[in-house]
Amino acid sequence: MPLFVKARSFLRNLFSSGRRDGDLDQEIHAHLEMLIEENIRAGMPPKEAQRAARMELGGAEQVKEQVREVRVGNWLHSVISDCRYGLRQLRKNPGFTAVAVVTLAMAIGANAVVFGVLNALILRPLNVPQAESLYGLELNKWGWESYPDYVDLRDRNRSFDGLAAYNIAQTGLDTGENAFPSWVYEVSGNYFDVLGIEPYLGRLIHASDEHGPNSAPYMVLTYAFWHSRFQDDPGVIGRIVQLNKHPFTIVGVAQRGFHGTFLFFSPDFFVPMVNQEQVSVVGANALNTRGTRWIFELIGHLKTGVTPAQAVADLNSVGSYLEKTYPKDDAKISFSLVRPSLYGNFLGGPIRAFVTGLMLLATLILLAACTNLGSLFAAHAADRSREMALRLALGAGRLRILRQLFTEAVLISIIGGAAGVLGSAVLLRWLSVWQPVHRYPINAVVSPDATVYGMAFLLTLASGFLFGAVPIRQVLRTHPYEIVKSGSIGRVGQRITVRDLLLGVQIAICAVLVTSSMVAVRGLVRSLHSNFGFEPRNAMLMDTALDMAGYSGDLVPAMQKRMIAAMETIPGVESVGLVSWPPLANGSWRESIVFTDETTDLTPSNAVASPVMYCISPDYLHAAGTALLAGRTFTWHDDENAPRVALVNREFASRIFGSPTNAMGRYFKMRDGARTQVVGIVEDGKYRNLTEDPQPAIFLPILQSPWSLTYMVVRSNREPPQLAAAMRSTLRTLDAGLPSYIQTWSEAQDIALFGARMATVSLGVLGVMGAMLSITGVFGMAAYSVSKRLKELGIRIALGAQPKEVLQVALGRAFKLLAFGSAAGLLLGIIAGPVLAHIVYQATPRDPLVLAGVVLTMALLGLLATWMPVRRALSVDPLRLLREE
Amino acid sequence: MRSEPTTILQGTLAMLILKSLIAGEMHGLGVSRRIQQLTGGTFSVKPGSLFPALHRMEEEGWISAFWGDSENNRRAKYYRLTKAGRKQLEVETQRWGRISWAIGQALEA
């Protein structure tokens, strides 16, 4: 019962405090009146009676305050009133509030984003039951496994509750409308059972489905693919679809939220590994050859009670058995256990290092932000020293005043933190659906969860207390008499303090980052418009693997010729070329060693060069926009019956034959010894990445080196979506079962530009962070020094100081720090230029635009940061100051 | 939030207020005068202690308050004992008995 009564009083105190106070007023008033009456009855004259009554009451306000203090929930009341007062204070100083809130929003937002990524990639295990005991096997540091070795490991180990295998492959899926390339996990029969995955619909694949090669033509869809491709149609169960023109039955849909076991690569569906021959192009006999290592990863749950070390010993004993039994294929085998989901240490190591580094950086940014906000707060507190002195003099406790200051700090941090978390949630959502590379389903879900929000909240509170604590000493040392007597304490040291140094370093770092990001942006813009040796604009790329649709041997070139002819009939198409693998696309290339014509011993060490190699159709150069400098291009007569010919680029010609003119008509030998004549010279280009030095390259006629992977380059001025649709329907009339992927050539360059873009974006983000820190730092310092010397400035102005001299005194140090810091940073940025040039093509700081940009930016930053203090210093009115202080 | 009264004086005040309200409902001044009378003038309770104690006891549920008219037809806030208050008085009385006996023993020894 008492608890209930208390709760009722608590609520009453909270929500009807106005009426309660009115009641109290009346009660005390009545008490006073009654005291007076009593005194009058005792025979006092009215005046005397009143005086005595007041004496006995002892101050109505104090009594009321005492009553209020004992009320239940009084603390909450005072917190609320502290907050109200704090908010009013913040509203009164909009500039200060805005700077503090924006700084914190960015610092906490950055931390939340990085922590969100850390949480999703590293802390949070895979989305499978009992993920803690799930391990991946890593063979010899990073190795793929062969199927026979997998079977031995699965059957001979004693540490795992089943060992599953999966491989990632691309395959052509034909559901009856349009064949298209899709991504598949080839899984061992026990995959789902080992992981403990449940079907959402139908059934999953089990070990009992496997009866030797190609015995289990079943597929299980992921929930996401079923949703996007089959519109949640439950009727798909039992449907037969074509994979690379082989019939497969859809038997089920995996449980929702299961995206496979490799975090970056979500498959569309799963098929049994025993059917791999029909699905991917590893090789006909991959299930039986021990030397062909193609399986991506083996995973399994450790048995209860088995430690990872015991499991490794167990696996290695199986490994030594394999070494002994199959010395030819299993020469040296050692295993280690890794966390699955990031492909062990091969990818996981660098990713962990990178994300941890980022986290460290973000924490440093937050700490620096707190330091700067601390000095800003100290300035703020110094401005209010009179108010505080007054409150102290009126009897407020120092604790009460400190609590008020902390309330303001925490209020700011909470507003800033909320804004930061909101921004970070948006950014993380966007990152979760972001596919950095158009062509591949590389994507990681990093949506924030409760851990991320909790962490951000803690950081918010912690930083509020951190920078709120800076003015503590100031408040504790406040002597009300001193301040009321002489105004704020005017002691300003002339020494260079640690804080100054820190600020200088921050400004320098900011200037380095600004310089580097401008260099990077300029380099990136330039590299997008530089000459690649081909023209990616106005060109579409359509890639197909003809073997996915069952073409082989002579059928391949015949089909390729028909495809070119068909594409050429599309209205608006200028030219159509075919290439085995386009330059600068999707991060891959092919190269082959060549020998001089005179070489007879064709061992690799005698090779003269290792040029990048392209197999092209006659019209490719035209379609790609690659200039032919001399000689002729190919014709369809350069086939297997004609003498072997090649086009080479300038670099190849100069490297092998001394000069381009020298090279025409000369011969070199391919890896297989075939003598090949140079019939033409083409311009140099970029082949592997944008920052490479000129590379030798050769172009061979597609009929003399057939290649089933086919990229068609279609040059046209038409809009890409319409053109793509036309290309798709043209291809369908040729072969409806041929999967194809269409993208613009510029999109295909995403991988080539990925590093440069990422570097530019990160530098930009860091630059903005650095700028923000510098602004708050300089602002805090300048505001503090102006506020502390207000009196001195007033006297100087009264004595006739000019604005310039006033600024010199008030802000000289801030300006000096800004100038020195910026100069140091700019210098460092210029020195760091060559490092950047490794990542971003043509990045050079020796660029007047960059230099001017940096100087302008830093000047602007300085202006922004000192704007308010400058205005304040200049608007000092000596008369008012002398009157007030 | 204050917890249970810990100092002997605070405890005593609450007890005296409860005791004085046994006789019937009273306003603040009445309570104060009644305590004076009960203790033979030893204790005179100042409003600065009386009102906080009354309000806190009301929140504890030992007494309840209502507005009524005083002897001179003045509106005043009256307090009366609740059931919980009567029980509390018993508890406090017993406790006080123990304490005074113990202290008496200590001083006599």
Image (cartoon, rainbow, N blue to C red):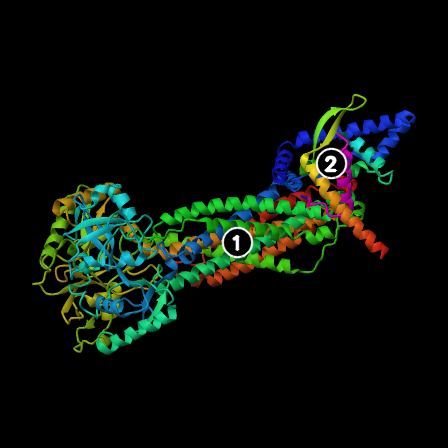
Residue A595 figure quarter:
bottom left
Q: Which residues are magenta?
A: B2-24
Chain under callout 1: A
Q: Characterize the local packing of mark 2: few (<14), some (14-19) or many (20 or more) Cα atoms within 10 angstroms.
A: many
Residue at the outermost left position:
A641
Position of A351 with respect to A322 (left or right) is: right
Q: How many marks do you count on the picture?
A: 2
The quadrant of the picture occupied by the N terminus of chain B is top right
What kind of element bears circle 2? helix
Q: Characterize the local packing of mark 1: few (<14), some (14-19) or many (20 or more) Cα atoms within 10 angstroms.
A: many
Q: Position of residue A327 (x, y in %)?
A: 23, 77
Q: Magenta-highlighted stretch: main secondary structure?
A: helix
Residue at the image point whose x is 21% and y is 45% from the top: A237
On the image, numbered disc 1 is attached to which residue?
A770
The quadrant of the picture occupied by the C terminus of chain B is bottom right
Q: Position of residue A635 (x, y in %)?
A: 12, 56
Q: Amino acid at mark 1?
A: Gly
For residue A645, above or below residue A40: below
Position of A322 with respect to A7 (left or right) is: left
Q: Is residue B72 magenta?
A: no
Q: Position of residue A457 (x, y in %)?
A: 53, 49
Residue B85 visible, this orientation? yes
Q: Position of residue A814 (x, y in %)?
A: 63, 53
Q: Is residue B10 magenta?
A: yes
Q: Amino acid at mark 2?
A: Leu
What kind of element bears circle 1? helix
Residue A755: image tag? none
